[in-house]
Amino acid sequence: MSLSAFLAENALPAAHIKYAVSSRFLSEKIDPETGKRKPMEWEIRTISGTEDEALRKTCVQQVPVPGRKHQFQRETDYDKYLGKLAVACTVFPNLNDKTLQDSYHVMGAETLLKTMLTPGEYADYIAKVQEACGF
């Protein structure tokens, strides 16, 4: 048996995924079949396990154990984690772009993402990001 297939230089890179999150954001390209403008495709990348672990750690908080003084347990805020994951995996559009944030009157990529998308679109996008990451 050879371990060469597992070497970094032999591993295939994870492909970026293009996904039309919403039909509200239209590109300038015309679909030849319908004659209408196509929805803009967002670009999603996969993050590494190391990046994912770092994201999870930023979403952990110490919560008091009920009925036990001075004892705490760790809990992960999964909504916060999923928001951070979506931002980390989004290549296009650049959610950190000041002009884009200013146009929605928000500060921060996570807030921008939640403001740009409707609740249903946001839920679909989170699901697509998780799928891209292999969840």
Image (cartoon, grey):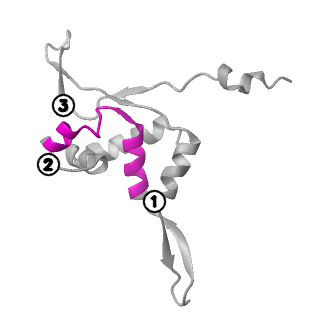
Where 122 sits versus 73, above or below?
A: above
Task: Identify the residue at horizontal 55%, vertical 87% (top origin).
Answer: 70
Pointer 1: what residue?
59
Read off the magenta span.
80-102
- C-alpha gap between disc 3 and disc 1: 30 Å
Disc 1 crowd rating (10 Å Cα; few below 14, some 14-19, many 20+) is some
Classify residue 29 by image quadrant: top left
Q: Determine which quarter of the picture holds residue 30.
A: top left
- Give the residue drawn at x 60%, y 21%: 12
Residue at mark 2: 105
Using the image as rendered, state which of residue 58 and residue 6 is in the foreground. Answer: 58
Q: Is residue 109 left or right of residue 46?
A: left
Q: CA distance from mark 3 to mark 2?
A: 18 Å
- x and y percentages locating residue 5 in the rendered image: 73, 22
Circle 2: residue type: His
- Find residue 22 and report its horizontal and vertical position in percent: 23, 34
- Mark 3 or mark 2, whichever is nearer to me: 2
| Disc number for residue 25 | 3
Residue 91 percent across, percent down from the top left: 37, 32
| 75 over 108 or under it: above or below | below
